Amino acid sequence: MAGLMTSQTSPLRPALLLLTSFLLVVQGCSSEDQRQSSSFNRVIPAVEAVEARYGTLPLEERLSGIVEAGNQVEIYPRISAPVHEVYVQNGDVVEEGEPLIRLDARDYRERVSQAQANLRISEARARQAEARLNEVRNQLRRQKTLYARELSSEAELENYEAQVATAEADYELSLAQVDQARSAISERQAELDRTVIRSPISGVVGGREVEVGMLVNTGTRLFTVGDISNSKVLISLTESMLRYIEIGQTARIYSETLGDTLLYGEISRISPFLSRGSFSTQAEIDIPNQSGLLHPGMFVAVDVLYGESEQATIVPISALYRHPRTGQEGVYIAGGFGSEVEPVTEVESGNPPPLSEPVELEFRQVQVVARGRESAGITGINSGEWIVTVGQSLMVGSEDNLARIRATSWERILAMQQTQPQDLLRQIMNQDIVTN
């Protein structure tokens, strides 16, 4: 079932954690609980941590998509002629069969008149051929009577029979010419009717590329018409994706232009034919668009949710850290941090919650078994261990690996992951930095 949900959707950017780390140091310095290491006479870094969970992650495939209106069609003329009148503008709502453009029809009316004249000539010739046929048939009957009385030769009889055969062929040819002339009238009339270009569907007009006086032909795009209240998103699937992406799976759609809005739909159709060269195919996601958030041609990001991962320890994406010295991907674990700590859900800039006593952190390499947009499933740590999510870069170069920890909730860290870097920078600029 397609629907709409409001949520922060901006992707995590590389600068975010660095800015957040700086903000933590600022808050740590301004806190009344600030302590300095007696050995090195330095400020002990402040970090944030969450408690790892055990469970599964939704498996998702991140793709790019293009929005199209429902039943979107491009309007082209089927004949060549100057534009005489344009009836609609961009944004107009039209019904199926409603006229959009009228082309100059003088040449096509003349063609209809010529075709009608040709029909009259063909009909007259057919009547002549019919009269001739009737005449030679009468002559043949008389000749047969004479031949029966032996008053005429066999050669004369055969001559009249040949004339009848020729007259019959001429009459058949004239009838065919009459049919041909009538078909020409229908064709010319159809061309005349095409001088008025009508909308093939009901929808909204857009993409106008025609003006009065333009000479248009069959290759000239005039308008695009589509039902923007029912949109669809087109995505490309590789050959390997067809093994696990199927019709009916949920798709989450978002874009920077949509702000904090998420749209949900289902994969409606998948083409079974792969394109040559790219070895990819196209899938469609139908999305109700009564609110008008989606615009045809709009670029969106699409997450296709195609299942769940195996059971694993779940941590926020921001907890994963690639150590600059070893290149290993892992997490910092606060081994001496107690589970009785109440996680913080909100942090006021002027009055941050107190930090813990210095705790020794351990960097532990992990294996990622499933990676979602906000969380990852990993092996190498246990559920219930406290994992650093913000401030890992502050530990690089630290000899004693000591840090003061603020226990934060999953909801807070996920919201921070979704925060735009410029918004976080604005928070930092609003801080009253106190130096001791």
Image (spheres, rainbow, N blue to C red):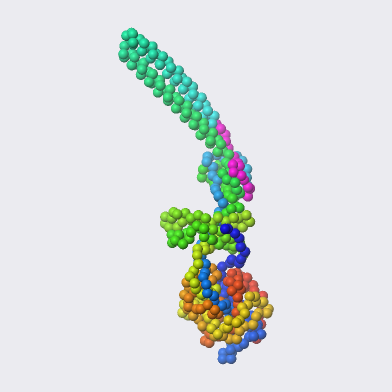
Number of numbered markers: 0
Image position, residue 210 (x, y; %): 58, 45
Say whether residue 273 is visible.
Answer: yes
- Figure quadrant of residue 384: bottom right
Report the side of 104 relative to 381 (left or right). right
For image coordinates 63% across by 43% down, the residue present is 87
Q: Quadrant of residue 2?
A: bottom right
Q: Give x and y (percent) for residue 184.
A: 49, 31
Position of residue 271 measured from the top left corner of the image (x, y, whole percent)? 47, 54
Q: Residue at point 48% right, 25% down?
A: 122
| Residue 253 sits above or below residue 395 on the image | above
| Residue drawn 59% across the image and 62% down it | 262
- Image quadrant in which the N terminus is located: bottom right
Whether residue 137 is in magenta: the answer is no
The answer to whether any part of residue 295 appears in the image is no
Locate residue 314 relative to residue 260 in the image: left or right: left
Q: Please state if 222 lies on the left or on the right of 279 as rendered.
A: right
- x 52%, y 69%: residue: 57
Q: State which quarter of the image contains the C terminus.
A: bottom right
- Identify whether 382 is placed above or below 306: below
Image coordinates of residue 404 in percent, x first then y, are: 59, 84
Magenta segment range?
Answer: 90-111
On screen, residue 163 above or below 119: above
